[in-house]
Amino acid sequence: MSTPPILYTFRRCPYAIRARMALKHAGIEYEHREVVLRDRPPQMMEISPKGTVPILALADGEVLEESMDIMLWCSPPEWLVGDWQALVEVNDGRFKENLDRYKYPNRFEEEVNPEAYRDEVLKILRQYERRLGESRYFCGPELSIADVALAPFVRQFANTDRAWFDGQELPNVQKWLGGMLASELFTESMEKFEQWRES
Ligand SMILES: N[C@@H](CCC(=O)N[C@@H](CS)C(=O)NCC(=O)O)C(=O)O
């Protein structure tokens, strides 16, 4: 029997959520090591000093230190359709930067007006809205890597002020997000774990 890979992960981290969903979709068993970010395990820091989650340690010693590398490692070929790379680039770039300033304005040195950043994200969501009017998922009628890569971030944005998000004219995005969050893939990826410690 081969040794399963080890995933260092944090439940609410959107990068870790996308990795867990992709691993689950691919049916890959792994050892789940729940990390508390202010108390990161030395075993993780040793293999990946940059200290971010998720980290996937493979049995052959290879270490995947980026969520997209983990997704790509386990994605079936039919998941890699359409312009998913461009979508991920916007999500991990402009979307995430504006989301952070909206959600955590106090973490930034410069004066941050959260609503201005919220509205920058809204501009991106309006583009998503058009796309999701054309197909059920981002890259066609079936779920693909793009949906799973983006959904945890759209979820985080929506949850920052749920009433505001629900009040926006974004029916396709709201329906898509609702479906993603209701899926077994998501709910089973959000199982709660105690902090991992070697024992
Ligand atoms: N580019 C990385 C980003 C991962 C990331 O920033 N994760 C956050 C948690 S959501 C983290 O570990 N932050 C800890 C830190 O930056 O010190 C990826 O895609 O995996």
Image (spheres, helix red, strand yellow):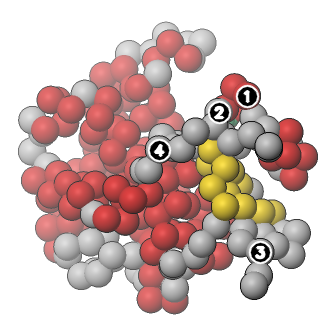
Q: Position of residue 107 (x, y in %)?
A: 56, 17
| Residue type at numbered disc 3 | Thr
Earlier in the chain: of badge 3 and badge 4, it is 3
Earlier in the chain: of badge 1 and badge 4, it is 1
Numbered badge on residue 3: 3
- Tell me which corner region of the image, top left, top right, bottom left or bottom right, holds residue 6: bottom right
Disc 1 target residue = 39
As helix, strand or loop, the secondary structure at mark 2 comes to loop
Earlier in the chain: of badge 3 and badge 1, it is 3
Q: Position of residue 113 (x, y in %)?
A: 38, 16
As helix, strand or loop, the secondary structure at mark 4 comes to loop
Disc 2 target residue = 36
Spatial distance from mark 2 to mark 4, Cα to Cα? 13 Å
| Residue type at numbered disc 4 | Lys
Q: Position of residue 144 (x, y in %)?
A: 39, 76
As helix, strand or loop, the secondary structure at mark 3 comes to loop
Spatial distance from mark 3 to mark 2, Cα to Cα? 24 Å
Disc 3 vs disc 4: Cβ atoms closer than 8 Å? Answer: no
Q: Nearer the viewer, mark 2 or mark 4?
A: 4
- Tell me which corner region of the image, top left, top right, bottom left or bottom right, holds residue 112: top left
- Taking depth in this image into account, of 188 and 17 the one nearest to the observer is 188
Q: Position of residue 174 (x, y in %)?
A: 17, 51
| Residue type at numbered disc 2 | Val
Earlier in the chain: of badge 2 and badge 4, it is 2
Left or right: where does residue 11 sit relative to residue 126? right
Quadrant of the displayed image that contains ligand 1: top right
Query: Quarter of the image containing the C terminus?
Result: top right
Left or right: where does residue 165 sit relative to residue 67? left
Left or right: where does residue 80 sit relative to residue 167? right
| Residue type at numbered disc 1 | Asp
- Taking depth in this image into account, of 129 and 151 the one nearest to the observer is 151
